[in-house]
Amino acid sequence: MTIALTRRQALGTLAAAAAVGSFGAPALARETVKVGALRFTSHAPSFVAYERGYFADVGLDVEFEFFQAAQPMAVAIASGDVDFGVTAITGGLISLAEKGAIKVVGGALQEEAGIDGQMILASNAAHDAGLTSPAALKGKTFGISTAGSSFHYMASKIAVAEGFPGEIGFRPLQKVSAIIGALKSGQIDAWAIVPHIAKALTGAGAVQTIGRVADYLPDYQVTTVFTSANNAAEERAKTEAFLAAFSRGAADFNAALVDRGGDEAAAEEMVKLIHTYVYTDRPYEKAAPSIRNGAMRTTPGAALKMGSVTDQLDWFKAEGLVRDDISIDQLVDPSYVASI
């Protein structure tokens, strides 16, 4: 079957190809690396790169280490227990960068106009009581994993945009599963999360959608690729090889489930691949709609939205969650991928 590429698809494919070329030669010898991941659709590029042999092509034998939240992954990379990770920028990650332990080397999930992204949710009880838009979040409780998490950042930026900074009550609940339970039971009023989780909850009638994060953070770099400072500085071939393979996985994912060029067979193949890692406790027929619903774009070529990363760093400083003297150069190694 011949599929005509849209301009967006063509640019994405070219960006990924250019990025692979810019990373240079693959690792000279086969090397085992551990990759941190969450069982989310948003981590699909790593799964695709593994299953389609892209990591093997560049000399990497990948083993996945699965986590429940972002912060433990950052700690594992700093300690050398994991080599590469993909997750949101958090206060803990920034503090580890300030200590010289980790570096952000690329971009992953992003918000983009016209593409379904993270959704702002309200519990049914709060919605019935009038929480029908983000403008009504003043004085309400908002679920976060920990202080300094991406959930904390998003809600704070929404509050500023709506004119009531500092007037949302944050409820740290450690794990996504705990936040879901609290929202469904009405113990918290609101939350924001990626679409494969949000749409499943709203589709079941467990919660209500009241807005979209992209309306408040249209260029948000939701997750980044990061590694240890030692890998970034001393293991350049390995780091470039990882980014090259990851970028190929991202390009395949974007083409099949985000840009949707009309090849249903390719989309179905992609969903089945992801189901090997995501919603594994569900039959495929029940898991497939949630996986498709989670298809946010991954930045082509692992490029990094530096404006968004800088804004996040500035927010963490302003909130007193990290030292105010940490610089963007301590957090990011810009030599690996393009900044956009």
Image (cartoon, rainbow, N blue to C red):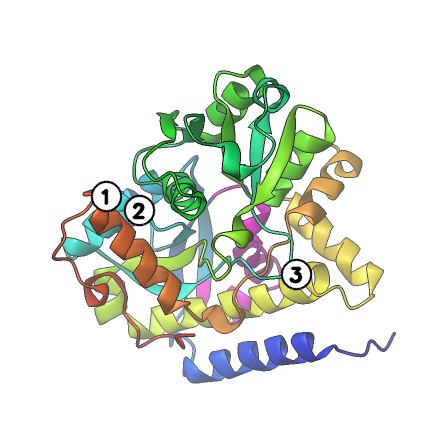
Seen from the viewer's position, the closer of residues 101 and 332 is 332
Q: Report crowding for label 2: few under 14, some 14 to 19, many 20 or more residues within 10 A (C-alpha).
A: many
**Nearest to viewer (mark 2 / mark 3):** 3
Distance in Å between CA atoms under marks 2 and 1:
20 Å
Secondary structure of residue under mark 1:
loop
Q: Report the span colored magenta.
A: 38-60
Q: Which residue is mark 3?
A: 114
Q: Report crowding for label 1: few under 14, some 14 to 19, many 20 or more residues within 10 A (C-alpha).
A: few
| Point 81% across, 79% down: residue | 4
The answer to if 155 sits in the magenta stretch is no
Q: Is residue 67 visible?
A: yes
- Report x, y in % for residue 178: 47, 23
Q: Which residue is mark 2?
A: 74
| Point 27% across, 69% down: residue | 333
Dot 2 amino acid type: Ala
Indicate which disc residue 319 carries.
Answer: 1
